[in-house]
Amino acid sequence: MTRHLEVLDAGVFSTTQDLGRHGLMHLGVPRSGAADRASLMLANRLVGNDEGAVGVESTFGGLVVRAHGALSVAVTGAPVPVRHEDRDLAPNSVLRLRDGDVLALGRPRVGLRTYVAVGGGLQPHRVLGSGATDVLSGLGPPALTAGAVLPVGPAPLAEPTIDHVAVRPPRAGVVELPLTLGPRDDWLHHEARDRLLASEWTVTPRSNRIGLRLDGAALALRHRHALPSEGIGLGAVQVPPHGQPILFLADHPVTGGYPVVAVVDDEAMDSAGQLVPGQRIRFRLSQRATLTPPDRRR
């Protein structure tokens, strides 16, 4: 029997994600991939997959799927009520689904994104070697809708030896993110640079997989003209002319003409990927050196 996962309800917003398209940014191809990579990798480990296997990223929950064939699944990330037929199950556990079983995710209590991995990995159509959906570039499979069928690869040869792990859930209060100043922090007035680090910033509802649009006291820029386009990476903190910063997430653009005044540490970006609208963040200086470009164009 061919094994696959049928989407009965995609919830608020669900996509297929892996660890993205690596090594192609010089060609203008963004990486994309899971917004919370650690949670996807944990889900894959629980079902015996390679850490980078394709799973489902469910935003704000509500995902409902049916198993076709016997499947092992794991649910990680933002903790949600997990309903399997007539039973409530714990997240961060291995669940055994029989042919025809239905698995339903509720709404997250904290955090934003929940991950579902299936033993054998999902096998959507891959673009440039990845099954990740990139909402900005349009690369990869489309966002999931009811009726979508996701083929599942062969079951892993070795059964997982751990069926549950204790994981600290995403933080519900103010989240502190370490960053390194630069390469264009000299575009900020001194007071604005101090404000970037001293203020609390609120995640607005206009945020998505591309980036977190933040609200707070506007940061004044020294210059009004635009920069020639420069490269943008994961974690870049960009300040447009209106002074409200944007923290770029997994589906960030590869270039931009507004100054990038800081970059959040890579290991903190999984936490950033779980921030919900209305949640507040505070930036602090990382232990790393300030990023300085070879040419500070004014």
Image: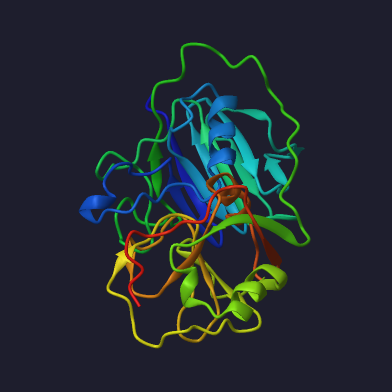
The outermost residue toward the top is: 158
The outermost residue toward the left is: 27
Residue 106 position, x and y percent, is 68, 53
**Quarter placement of the N terminus:** top left
Q: Quadrant of residue 89?
A: top right
Residue 17 position, x and y percent, is 44, 45
162 versus 265 height, above or below = above
Residue positioned 40% across, 88% down in the render: 224
Q: How many numbered marks have been drawn onto this rendered protein structure?
A: 0
Is residue 75 rendered to the left or right of residue 293?
right
Residue positioned 36% across, 49% down in the render: 31
Residue 4 position, x and y percent, is 42, 34
Q: Nearer the viewer, residue 155 or 16?
A: 16
4 versus 298 height, above or below = above
The outermost residue toward the right is: 173
**Quarter placement of the C terminus:** bottom left
278 versus 271 height, above or below = below
Can residue 208 be seen here?
no
Residue positioned 62% across, 59% down in the render: 60
Residue 15 position, x and y percent, is 45, 52
Is residue 224 rendered to the left or right of residue 261?
left
